[in-house]
């Protein structure tokens, strides 16, 4: 990453144990309740997974680079220009729960700043949705409601 490339860091305290919060991101049975609508499988090192957002008619290929149980997930997925960018989750246990930090970098093209801002907003919604689900068993439907005019009928 050069000095001019944007880097996105989003974090939130989720008041649940690190093992449970970590599992929410690697197990599609949980993740589909707050982020994407379908996944081809669990996040495991070396796997290529497909995530679908069926309400928008879009999907993404995810290359799982590393999974350190209860501590870290590293994937790569394509940006708007088809360039793989890294996305890293870290899970830091705290007395009150778990701080989840999501870091993304490597945005390309003349719209790199716009991509970074879009990623930050998206990952903030994902963390808020996960928090609501794990702490209160509430399904906020944040991702689906973020762009109501783009939903495929």
Image (spheres, helix red, strand yellow):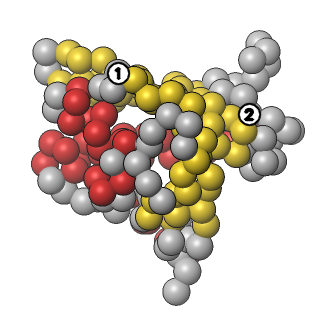
Residue at 33% across / 26% down in the picture? Answer: 69
Numbered tag placed on residue 7 in the rendering:
none
Q: Nearer the viewer, mark 2 or mark 1?
A: 1
Question: Would you say 76 lies left or right of 93 here?
Answer: right
Residue at 23% across / 47% down in the picture? Answer: 132
Q: Is residue 106 visible?
A: yes
Residue 32: quadrant of the picture: bottom left
Which residue is denoted by mark 2 in the rendering? 107
Question: Would you say 53 lies left or right of 100 here?
Answer: right
Above or below — where is 121 with respect to 101? below
Element carrying mark 2: loop
The 10 Å Cα crowd at callout 1, few under 14, some 14 to 19, many 20 or more, is some
Q: CA distance from mark 2 to mark 1?
A: 25 Å
Q: Is residue 34 visible?
A: no
Which residue is denoted by mark 1 in the rendering? 71
Above or below — where is 112 with respect to 48? above
- Residue 8: % across, % down: 58, 28
């Amino acid at each position: 990453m050069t000095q001019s490339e944007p880097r996105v860091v989003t974090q939130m305290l989720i008041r649940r144990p690190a093992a449970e919060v970590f599992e929410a991101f690697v197990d599609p049975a949980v993740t589909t309740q707050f982020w994407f609508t379908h996944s081809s499988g669990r996040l495991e090192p070396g796997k290529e997974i497909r995530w679908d957002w069926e309400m928008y008619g879009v999907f993404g290929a995810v290359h799982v680079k590393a999974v350190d149980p209860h501590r870290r997930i590293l994937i790569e997925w394509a940006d708007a220009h088809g360039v793989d960018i890294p996305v890293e989750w870290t899970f830091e246990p705290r007395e009150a729960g778990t701080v989840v930090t999501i870091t993304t970098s490597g945005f390309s093209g003349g719209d790199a700043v716009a991509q970074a801002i879009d990623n930050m907003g998206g990952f903030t919604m994902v963390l808020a949705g996960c928090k609501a689900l794990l702490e209160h068993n509430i399904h906020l439907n944040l991702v689906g409601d973020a762009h109501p005019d783009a939903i495929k009928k």
